[in-house]
Image: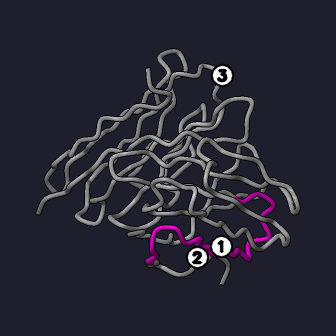
């Protein structure tokens, strides 16, 4: 059963703590993406990776970091430097970077207090 | 002008009605267009790609108008289960990025 998994579904953290969100896909897709969604706003791109061991900043990368050591995995770390980390985080993948459909995981709701 | 604009709605329609949404985009060089459906507190799910020649999938029809820079989504014979937010997605030409609209909310009423 192919797809994208994200864990956990809900995450609560205290301010000042780093937290890592998991994203795994078994679709054999080369490209992976991280977005955040806030109420009343469109999805905003945090980071993307076109291929293993390569990634680029998106529009709102400050306060976040990623790694892409394996094709299947693209974890996102929300650091204490991110000023407004509470949001719905969505991971996506596509066959390749470029004009291809993106498929999303179920998301992680992060609440930082 | 926003890169992608959608009427937020909500569009309240009775079951069986036909409803249409438009989405305007600002980059005339954009090449890829999609409609996604997002249910409350869930991830977006791909509804359909939008091709230059249009695209139809059952009760759903998507059209592209390059001259006026908009895409449209038509839903015929609306079902209660069509209630959701519909996101318009457009590529940022020359990059690997997509711009997501803020969505149009549809409520189909019994």
Q: Which residue is mark 1?
A: A23
Instruction: Please give the name of the residue rendered at 33% of the width and 47% of the height, measured from the top-left corner.
Output: A40
Which picture quadrant has residue B27? top right
Mark 3: secondary structure: loop
Query: The numbered mark 2 sits on a residue in which chain?
Result: A
Q: CA distance from mark 1 to mark 2?
A: 5 Å
In terms of depth relative to the viewer, which is nearer, A60 or B73? A60
Nearest to viewer (mark 1 / mark 3):
1
- Specify the subunit that label 1 lies on: A
Let me know if residue B98 is in the magenta part. Answer: no
Residue projecting furthest to the bottom? A1
Q: Which residue is mark 3?
A: B29
Secondary structure state at the residue bearing disc 2: strand
**Is B42 situated left or right of A64 in this image?**
left
Dot 1 or dot 2: first in sequence order is: 2
Q: Is residue A13 magenta?
A: yes
Looking at the image, is A22 positioned above or below residue B94? below
Image quadrant in which you'd find residue A80: bottom right
Q: Nearer the viewer, residue A34 or A78?
A: A78
Give the residue number, with chain letter if any, for mark 2: A6
User: Which SS class for mark 1?
Assistant: strand
Q: CA distance from mark 1 to mark 3?
A: 32 Å
The reply to whether callout 1 and callout 2 are in contact (CB within 8 Å) is: yes
The magenta-colored residue range is A12-32
Residue A37 image offset from top left, x and y in percent? 45, 54
For the C terminus of chain B, the quadrant is bottom left
Q: Nearer the viewer, mark 2 or mark 3?
A: 2
């Amino acid at each position: 059963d192919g797809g994208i998994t994200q864990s956990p579904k809900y995450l609560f953290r205290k301010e000042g703590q780093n937290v890592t969100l998991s994203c795994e896909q078994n679709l054999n897709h080369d490209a992976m993406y991280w977005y955040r969604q806030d109420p009343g706003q469109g999805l905003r791109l945090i980071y993307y990776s076109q291929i293993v061991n390569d990634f680029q900043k998106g529009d709102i990368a400050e306060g976040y970091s990623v790694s892409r050591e394996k094709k299947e995995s693209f974890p996102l770390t929300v650091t204490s430097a991110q000023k407004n980390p509470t949001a719905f985080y969505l991971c996506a993948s596509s066959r390749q970077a470029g004009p291809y459909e993106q498929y999303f995981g179920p998301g992680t709701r992060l609440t930082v207090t | 002008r926003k890169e992608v604009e959608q009427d937020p709605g909500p569009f309240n329609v009775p079951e069986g009605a036909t409803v249409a949404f438009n989405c305007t985009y600002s980059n005339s060089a954009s090449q890829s267009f999609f409609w996604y459906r997002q249910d409350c507190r869930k991830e977006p799910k791909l509804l359909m790609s939008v091709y230059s020649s249009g695209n139809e999938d059952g009760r759903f029809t998507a059209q592209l108008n390059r001259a006026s820079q908009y895409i449209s989504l038509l839903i015929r014979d609306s079902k209660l289960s069509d209630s959701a937010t519909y996101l318009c997605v457009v590529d940022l030409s020359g990059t690997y990025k997509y711009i997501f609209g803020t969505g149009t909310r549809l409520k189909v009423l019994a």
